[in-house]
């Protein structure tokens, strides 16, 4: 696991603690005004040491700030940074960088929406997924499904789209697949 992934996992693991999660939620609710440790202790109805520990951990994780004025403020961009780190670890992420017009069709490394059927993005999506599959020979349907399942829940629909757009070829029995048309050379 990369350092970035380990950090994201640590952020999420630390937020599984109820006190830390409640403290972060209260700080987010209070916005830029933030809250002192005493105010948080009162709002959360928890002992001061427990609230102080939660705030210290949130600051260490980069999810809150605590300055010399004794006021803690939420830093929600810390969550966005952790989510972005997880997104970069998704298997399609390196390829998706070359297809910016398809980014809206993906969420956290998963195909979340197919482009309209007659859209110019449909064959482009087929090309991206053909690069992702990186077929160099014939594969059974189970293997194609396994690979596509890494990036989509609609394996059958995506497989059909790839056949329809020519990026994937299927034998007459419909059980074996191979690469369709040749992939263009990457730009650059």
Image (tube, grey):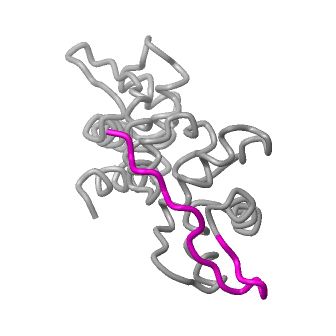
Q: Is residue 181 shown above or below 36?
A: below
**Image point 39% across, 47% down: which residue?**
186
Residue at image coords 48%, 43%: 21
Q: Quadrant of the C terminus?
A: top left
Quarter holding the N terminus?
bottom left
Can residue 170 be seen? yes
**What's the magenta region?**
169-188
Q: Where is residue 150 in the image (x, y as percent from the top left)?
A: 55, 66
Answer whether residue 136 is magenta in the image. no
Q: Position of residue 9 (x, y in %)?
A: 37, 56
Question: Which secondary structure class fits the magenta region best?
Answer: loop
Q: Quadrant of residue 5?
A: bottom left
The residue lying toward the viewer, choosing from 163 and 107, is 163
- Up-down relation of residue 184 to residue 61 (above or below): below
Does the magenta portion include 183? yes
Furthest toward the left, the residue is: 68
In front of the other: 106 or 172: 172
Q: Does residue 60 appear left or right of residue 180 in this picture?
A: left
């Amino acid at each position: 696991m990369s350092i970035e992934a380990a950090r994201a996992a640590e952020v999420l693991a630390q937020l599984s603690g109820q006190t830390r999660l409640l403290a972060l939620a209260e700080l987010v609710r209070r916005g830029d005004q933030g809250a002192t440790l005493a105010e948080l202790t009162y709002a959360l109805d928890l002992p001061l040491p427990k609230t102080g520990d939660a705030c210290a951990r949130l600051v260490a994780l980069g999810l809150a700030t605590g300055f010399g004025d004794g006021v803690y403020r939420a830093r929600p961009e810390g969550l966005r940074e952790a989510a972005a780190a997880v997104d970069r670890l998704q298997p399609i992420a390196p390829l998706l960088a070359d297809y910016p017009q398809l980014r809206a069709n993906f969420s956290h490394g998963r195909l979340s929406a197919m482009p309209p059927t007659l859209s110019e993005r449909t064959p482009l999506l087929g090309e991206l997924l053909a690069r992702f599959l990186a077929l160099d020979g014939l594969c059974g349907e189970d293997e194609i499904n396994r690979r596509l399942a890494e990036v989509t829940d609609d394996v059958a629909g995506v497989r059909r789209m790839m056949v329809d757009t020519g990026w994937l070829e299927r034998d007459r029995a419909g059980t074996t697949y191979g690469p369709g048309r040749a992939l263009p050379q990457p730009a650059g």
